[in-house]
Amino acid sequence: MAISALGYLGIRSGQIDDWSDFASNLLGMQQVDRAGKTLAFRMDDRKQRLIVSDETGDTLSFIGWEVAEKSDLEQYATRLEAESVVVEYGNAELLDRRFVSELIYFYDPDGNRVELFYKPMLTTDPFEPGRSISGFNTGVLGMGHCVLNVKDADKMLGFY
């Protein structure tokens, strides 16, 4: 039972146009057209890596961590529930929006929504960066890492 990579991030922001410019022109991500007030970006063969919703708050909406095996989801759910963490299973609509086969989600002690998922959908379309990039390859490391600003480091360390 192991988390293999950071798969995706969701952000809430009332400055969605600024995010479009930042993700495409600075980070070099490829914008993927989405319906409604949501932008999605990719950086490799995954359908999406960064999802930005036009909402107030300028906060983290969710973190998606990839697991290697489908059975890992149930093992994590059992372990979390034993610690009185409420675990939910993603419905078909959520799975479609995240482009994954299976997922569970729960909230960490600071209220961050954490999603564990299995089997992301891949695209055969070549990645077209938003700016010139050479030698860029995410590979098995996914998005790399993220940093959380926390209220109580000891509590969060114990959880994670």
Image (cartoon, rainbow, N blue to C red):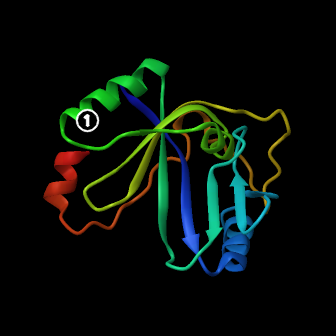
Name the image quarter holding residue 12. Answer: bottom right
Quadrant of the rendering where the N terminus is positioned: top left
The relative height of residue 124 versus residue 145 in the rendered view (above or below) is: above
Name the image quarter holding residue 155. Answer: bottom left
Residue displayed at 68% across by 69% down: 26
Q: Secondary structure at mark 1?
A: helix
Residue displayed at 41% across by 54% down: 113
Number of numbered discs overlaid on the protein picture: 1
Q: Which residue is mark 1?
A: 81
Q: Is residue 92 left or right of residue 124?
A: left
Whole-percent x, y for residue 111 in the image: 33, 61
Whole-percent x, y for residue 68 in the image: 48, 24
Q: Is residue 15 left or right of residue 30?
A: left
The relative height of residue 24 versus residue 9 in the rendered view (above or below) is: below
Whole-percent x, y for residue 76 in the image: 33, 30
Q: Is residue 114 left or right of residue 52?
A: left
Whole-percent x, y for residue 91 in the image: 57, 38
Name the image quarter holding residue 150. Answer: bottom left
Characterize the local packing of mark 1: few (<14), some (14-19) or many (20 or more) Cα atoms within 10 angstroms. few
- Depth check, front residue: 28 or 70: 70
Quadrant of the rendering where the C terminus is positioned: top left
| Residue projecting furthest to the right | 125
Residue displayed at 19% across by 33% down: 82
